[in-house]
Image: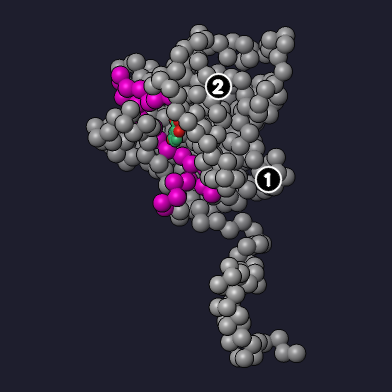
Amino acid sequence: MSAVPQASQKSGRVDLYRRMDKHHLAPLWEVLHALVPTKPQTPCVPALWKYRDVRPYVMESGALITAREAVRRVLILENPGMRGKSCITNSLYCGLQLILPGEIAPSHRHTQSALRFIVEGSGSYTAVDGERTTMHPGDFIITPSWTWHDHGNPGNEPVVWMDGLDIQILQLFGAQFSENYAEEVQPVSKPEGDSYNRYGHNLAPLDYTPSGKTSPIFSYPYAKSRETLATLSRSEDPDPCHGWKMQFINPLTGGYAMPTIASFIQLLPKDFRSSAYRSTDGTIWSVVEGRGTVKIGAETHAFEPRDTFVAPPWNPVRFETAGEEAVLFSFSDRPAQVALGLWREQRG
Ligand code: GTQ
């Protein structure tokens, strides 16, 4: 038998494909290497959104549609390699949400888990299951799957935050549900700080048994995470890949704050050149403090506060800072990959 297909075999195959196509059948051998590649293959590309460039569009949207009419007034950060799919990586959605003084974004709930990372402005709130949390730049807030949530801005300045949702994961599984609350704003049933005081102080109620897969606290104030980073930086050397990096946890399990999305906060020392690091979880960063550059795969981008950038799965990431420290927030689908036994990382 010859290893090279005969012309008759080739035309026979084309004929076979054509006839079986009507029965919704397709030959695996034509697509096998694309389906089962030797290393991660993705249309997701590295990208950075400069807040300086994006902000005017965010503010212009504020003059053209209200939060009430939009339901959520958000500009989606679409990965340049996956335009039209409303995603920033294969599995995650990211957007910048604007809420102007006096506005409300009406209450709803969905099976998608959401995080908010406050980029600009103070004085707005997110309400989750009867408790409001006032937002400040750098705060990390979660909206667990199927919890009622609405946003409002009783303050006097525009507030912009980054939204991260597991929309594409829910799409993959076909498990999306959502509904609107009967009223625009859900009733406030708990004082501000209730969940943080109950669960965020190394204490738990006597009868507490974890219910669900999400952290019982939904606000992680920047003041606390920044203090932790400062403490670490005074007492130990930075990690060569990450600087000083911490993960946000569910304080009652030690696990991730949400079952599908992990989030992190890291401090890069000044005059730092990190070693290359890659992992299978494509990651989105929001810059809180400081300037530097990030090399993602073959692309290098300069970053400054409030910029957002994305590293696709398995793309090596390197950071450089000069003269100043930098603080970066990030999130990825790591918990989902870990739960399924898929997550890999490589240093150097
Ligand atoms: O705030 O509930 O960016 O439902 C996309 C979908 C935000 C939200 C988004 C949402 C929300």
Start-end of magenta stretch:
83-107
Residue at the front extreme, as displayed: 23
Q: Is residue 288 left or right of residue 19?
A: left
Mark nearer the N terminus (2 vs 1):
2
| Residue at x-position 64% and y-position 59% | 39
Q: Secondary structure at mark 2?
A: loop
| Disc number placed over residue 343 in the picture, else none | 1
Q: Is residue 139 magenta?
A: no
Q: Is residue 316 left or right of residue 211?
A: left
Q: Nearer the viewer, residue 239 or 316?
A: 316
Identify residue type, mark 1.
Answer: Trp
Give the quadrant of residue 125.
Answer: top left
Give the quadrant of residue 105.
Answer: top left
Give the quadrant of residue 50.
Answer: top left
Identify residue type, mark 2.
Answer: Phe
> How far apart are labels 2 and 1 at the CA level?
26 Å
**Disc 2, disc 1: CB below 8 Å?**
no
| Residue at x-position 42% and y-position 38% | 95
Q: Is residue 110 left or right of residue 199?
A: left
Tell me if mark 1 has few (under 14), some (14-19) or many (20+) residues whose alpha carbon lies within 10 angstroms of its own: some
Asked whether residue 294 appears in the rendered view, the answer is no
Asked whether residue 27 appears in the rendered view, the answer is yes
Q: Nearer the viewer, residue 40 or 288?
A: 40
Tell me if mark 2 has few (under 14), some (14-19) or many (20+) residues whose alpha carbon lies within 10 angstroms of its own: many
Quadrant assignment for ligand 1: top left
Residue annotated with mark 2: 218
Q: How many marks?
A: 2
